Image (cartoon, rainbow, N blue to C red):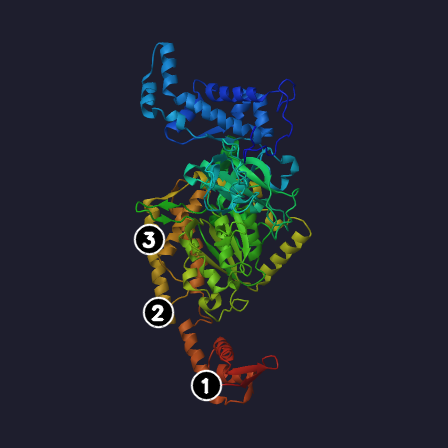
Amino acid sequence: MSGFDANTVHAVPVLRPDPSSSSGLSGGLSSSEFNSLLRDFIMAFRVGGDFIYRDQLRANVILKQYLLDVDLRHVGLFHEELGHAIQVHPGVLVPLFEKEATRCAKRILEPGRHLSDSRRDGQRSDDEEDTAQIIGGVASEIPLIQVMIHTGMNMQSLRNLTSESMNKLIRTPGIVIQTATLQARATKLALRCRVCGSTKRIYPTSGIGGIGTGGGRGEQGLPRICDAPPLESGQKKDCGLDPYQIMHDKCEFMDSQTLKLQEAPDMVPVGELPRHLILFADRYLTSRVAPGSRVIVTGIYSTFNVGKNKNSSGAVAVRQPYLRLLHIEQDTSFSGSHGAFGSRFTPQEEEEFAQMARSPAFYERFANSVAPSIFGSLDIKKAIACLLFGGSKKLLPDGMRLRGDINVLLLGDPGTAKSQLLKFVEKVAPIAVYTSGKGSSAAGLTASVQRDSTSREFYLEGGAMVLADGGVVCIDEFDKMRDEDRVAIHEAMEQQTISIAKAGITTVLNSRASVLAAANPVFGRYDEARSAGDNIDFQVTILSRFDMIFIVKDTHDEARDKAIAEHVVGLHMNRVMEVETNVEGELSLEKMKRYIAFCKAKCAPRLTPEAATLLSSHFVAFRKEVQQLEAENRERNSIPMTARQLEAIIRISEALAKMTLSPTVHEHHVNEAIRLFKTSTMDAVTASGVEGISRGELNEEVQAIEKEIRKRLPIGWSTSYQALVKEFVQNQGFTQHALDRSLYILEKREVIRFSNQKKVVHRSGV
């Protein structure tokens, strides 16, 4: 009886069971009885009047797809002991299953057998006549049928895979982070002795995808000595050592591929590194997934010997685990907790969600449920709620894709709970990846090309934007990123793809994710005297890709400060404040996560003509307002108002409609979207001018003050700050902001320097 990975006994009981005894693989069944049961299952199992697997096998082989997809629950219904035996001893029974499937395929498609059966029955159907003409004598050329086994058994996380799971059928979820190139693995080698010309066939015993180690020199596992019979004269042949050559045209190969599976980020305990598992796929299971795909895999948990290298001791008893794939399915739902992964929505849940969407003021209720421990910032919470739901993706007739994901930038003073909002979004979003700007490189955000230590081949490893495909990427400390790293996510934010052209690998990966970024102004706190562009210090290219830009200022207001103090103290005392009791029925974290996934799966709103007219007229008004502002300030605005901003308002409107499961976007959705856009991006655009003067006038004052200071203060001289205030502000009528800004600019240019806690100004340069 052969094992799975090679034609030798592999990871199975050493002693064969005695057919006469009652201690077979399972329940006393012998190998021949298993063969008979498997054959009967393929040919005779039916649901209603349909012979599921017989018809599937016939259809696949006619299409030259030599595979059979089997549901293990059907095997258990057909024969309980057989189903249990496949779970416990898959390494032994799956090869038997494949051989029996191949025999059944030949039996189904053999024209002579069809003819004899029909004559015996006294009639022959038209389908059988057509089949006989199509296949002719092809049945004898059918290769080994691949049996894919999927099951509804409970999933095990990678952390729970122990030695008890070894050589058993397991099912586990995760994210594919690495895919190797496709390889041709030999299943049968034809050898010829270069001295005497004798031929020999062997079945190689190499490890998974070339990762194992074999005996012999150069070619792994080839016989060292020619074992052909002696000549007729009885003379002993001496063919020397290593005489065999491989005849490649007479060998048989199959496709194989190695993948690397990683735990989903939300399944990793805090402070732990995510676990990895090598997957080995062959034949029809290869080239099915790309890095970043969330999958549920079923396979045989086995081991291979990695050999001795710098990462391992090479000890025989210490072996590397891997999963021999029997089935791989894309996880189209969302990743939740261990039990929720891959789960679907029950009718009771759907009814509950529909009632929630119809309830009055649900939009405010959901917004108040976003980070309820954070005081105020209701508009930011509403924007984050829109980001969680997203708009509708569109595929135009010419193949162009329009993104539906909403990107939000929070720019503000320290201590305004920006990072806490990001952490909450990471918990509530069905798929989310949290990263910090300082610790993220361009390769870590997009994708990197790595070289395998054993095969020396390059492979792709997805970064944060790829792993968050279909979810949210939370980037904290966005301003601390290097410019070259920030540029790497331009394409991912708008086109939602990541193009890779490195080390001979040219490919495009999906990164359909929303970006929620938090940043501080250039000098730590937001300076009212400076323009939004001076405070933000981001390129226009990155700012135009954000649908909403919030400037969060830490303003001094006694009533607000008192409310915040009471709220924070109440949180630390673990009591609910009265100010929060008016929030009717805050949603739990798990319910919010399920509701977001339900809305994204079931609803894709479209604009009504009235809403479209309202949107276009408001966009024209916004453009005109920005144009007037630029004319007044005599400079281009750092936050642009382009067609992207019109698309942003459309996406926000669609997200508001999706939040209440509305199939169309109505005018009240558009009005709320425009209000959100005004309080965010438009406020950032118009955040200019102080004390009633425009930025253009402020710049003129600054230039005049600079000129006067250079003229009146020779190099090496010094004066007090109060003297400058008296001269320029009180006597000449300049504003305090203009003086402070001109002194700041001169200090940066090293024209002046301060001393004595900025009370004395020294002229130090030209």
| Quarter of the rendering containing residue 184 | top left
| Percent of width and height locating residue 438 | 55, 61
Q: CA distance from mark 1 to mark 3?
A: 49 Å
Mark 3, other Cα within 10 Å: few <14 / some 14–19 / many ≥20: few
N-terminal-most mark, 2 or 1: 2
| Quarter of the rendering containing residue 630 | bottom left
Is residue 430 in view? no
- Circle 2 sits on which residue? 631
Say which amino acid is labelled 3: Ser
Instruction: Give left or right: position of 675 versus 27.
Output: left
Say which amino acid is labelled 1: Glu
Which label sits on residue 708?
A: 1
Question: At 54% across and 90% down in the image, what residue appears?
Answer: 717
Question: At 64% across and 30% down in the image, what residue appears?
Answer: 14
Q: Is residue 729 above or below residue 24?
A: below
Which label sits on residue 697?
A: none
N-terminal-most mark, 2 or 3: 3
Which label sits on residue 616?
A: 3
Q: Nearer the viewer, residue 498 or 608?
A: 498
Q: How many marks?
A: 3
Secondary element at image label 2: helix
Mark 1, other Cα within 10 Å: few <14 / some 14–19 / many ≥20: few
Is residue 343 in view? yes
Mark 2, other Cα within 10 Å: few <14 / some 14–19 / many ≥20: few
Question: At 63% across and 39% down in the image, what residue appears?
Answer: 160
Q: Is residue 159 above or below residue 73?
A: below
N-terminal-most mark, 1 or 3: 3
Q: CA distance from mark 2 to mark 1?
A: 27 Å
